[in-house]
Image: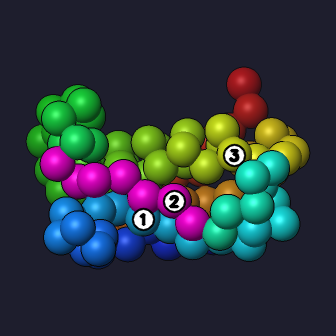
Amino acid sequence: MKIEINLGTAPNGATIWGIGYDSSITHDKTCGTSVEKKYLDSILPQTASNEEYHYEVAKYVSSMLEEKLSDKNLIFEIEFICQGTSFKKMKL
């Protein structure tokens, strides 16, 4: 499964990174989640390129969805794509 991470604008005018997904995969039956870009930029590590930044965004957004999943193993089947940069959580 692939989930695209999109840059958008919230109703309050804030710039956000957000995703949409099928509500059947989450315990709270939501179909999307987002985080304000300004907040995310304040907590992400410094990056040397846009690609590295987009990777960090995808990694963070994956953790947001993982918290909501009914079946936690599903996270290993999802590829998160942010501006062409991909992140997929791997089992250790």
**Residue 1 sits in which quadrant?**
bottom right
Of the numbered discs 2 and 1, the one sitting upstream in the chain is 1
**Residue 29 sits in which quadrant?**
bottom right
In the displayed structure, would residue 42 be above or below residue 21? above
Of the numbered discs 3 and 1, the one sitting upstream in the chain is 1
Q: Which mark is residue 49?
A: none
- Amino acid type, mark 1: Gly
Q: Which residue is mark 2?
A: 33
Magenta segment main secondary structure? strand
Determine the secondary structure under disc 1. Answer: strand
- Amino acid type, mark 2: Thr
Q: Are marks 2 and 1 in contact (CB under 8 Å)?
A: yes
**Residue 5 sits in which quadrant?**
bottom left
Mark 3 to mark 1 CA distance (whole Å): 14 Å
| Position in image of residue 30 (x %, y %) | 67, 63
Determine the secondary structure under disc 3. Answer: helix
Residue sitting at x 80%, y 40%: 72
Circle 3 residues within 10 Å: few <14, some 14–19, many ≥20: some
Q: Could you tell whether 49 is left or right of 53 in the image?
A: left
Residue sitting at x 24%, y 31%: 43
| Position in image of residue 41 (x %, y %) | 19, 42
Q: Which residue is mark 3?
A: 68
- Amino acid type, mark 3: Lys
Residue 3 colored magenta? no
Residue sitting at x 55%, y 40%: 63
| Position in image of residue 32 (x %, y %) | 57, 66
Quarter of the image containing the C terminus?
Answer: top right
What's the magenta region? 32-38
Circle 1 residues within 10 Å: few <14, some 14–19, many ≥20: many
Q: Which residue is mark 1?
A: 18
Q: Are marks 2 and 3 in contact (CB under 8 Å)?
A: yes
